[in-house]
């Protein structure tokens, strides 16, 4: 899942760590106690990551920035909806969060962010020829 060998990849590694932490806690029956802290971290970290990633996409002229932004907005909305459910007393948030994160990693990062990586690679190769 290497995208930029820099801040974007570091953010993704943090997300993978958070997913693993949730999975471990859930499998040990501690998912609910971890969810509040993890949701707060995820919302904060995701918003910061998205800001960095979108700035980089704009800087390099990434042609699918608008579509990428839509995916980001949907993910943040999903996280915030789960936060509201948790605050409302829902006990299924840990499993729903696990599913949301799994889908984000497999669909968004592996597909859409990989497209960004290909674009950046082509742009670097073109620049090195000049």
Image (cartoon, rainbow, N blue to C red):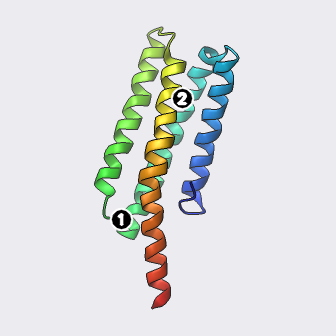
Q: Is residue 20 left or right of residue 75?
A: right
Give x and y (percent) for residue 82. Answer: 44, 22
Q: Is residue 6 above or below residue 78?
A: below
Frontmost residue, 56 versus 114:
114
Q: Residue tagged by mark 1?
A: 62
Mark 2 Cα shell of 10 Å, populated few (<14), some (14-19), many (≥20): some
Give x and y (percent) for residue 60. Answer: 40, 69
| Residue drawn at x 49%, y 46% as measured from the top left | 48
Q: Earlier in the sequence, mark 2 or mark 1?
A: 2
Mark 1 Cα shell of 10 Å, populated few (<14), some (14-19), many (≥20): some
Closer to viewer: mark 2 or mark 1 = 1
| Residue drawn at x 62%, y 47% as measured from the top left | 13
Q: Is residue 15 above or below residue 3?
A: above
Cβ atoms at labels 2 and 1 below 8 Å apart: no
Q: Residue tagged by mark 2?
A: 40
User: Distance of mark 2 from mark 1, alpha carbons?
Assistant: 30 Å
Q: Is residue 45 left or right of residue 61?
A: right
């Amino acid at each position: 899942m290497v995208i930029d060998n820099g801040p974007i990849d570091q953010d993704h590694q943090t997300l993978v760590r958070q997913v693993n932490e949730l999975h471990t806690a859930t499998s040990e029956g501690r998912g609910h106690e971890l969810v509040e802290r993890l949701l707060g971290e995820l919302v904060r970290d995701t918003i910061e990551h998205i800001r960095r990633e979108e700035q980089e996409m704009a800087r390099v002229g990434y042609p699918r920035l608008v579509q990428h932004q839509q995916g980001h907005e949907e993910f943040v909305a999903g996280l915030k909806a789960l936060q509201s459910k948790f605050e409302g007393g829902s006990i299924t948030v840990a499993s729903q969060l696990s599913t949301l994160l799994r889908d984000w990693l497999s669909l968004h990062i592996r597909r859409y962010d990989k497209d960004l990586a290909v674009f950046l690679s082509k742009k670097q190769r073109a620049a090195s020829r000049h």
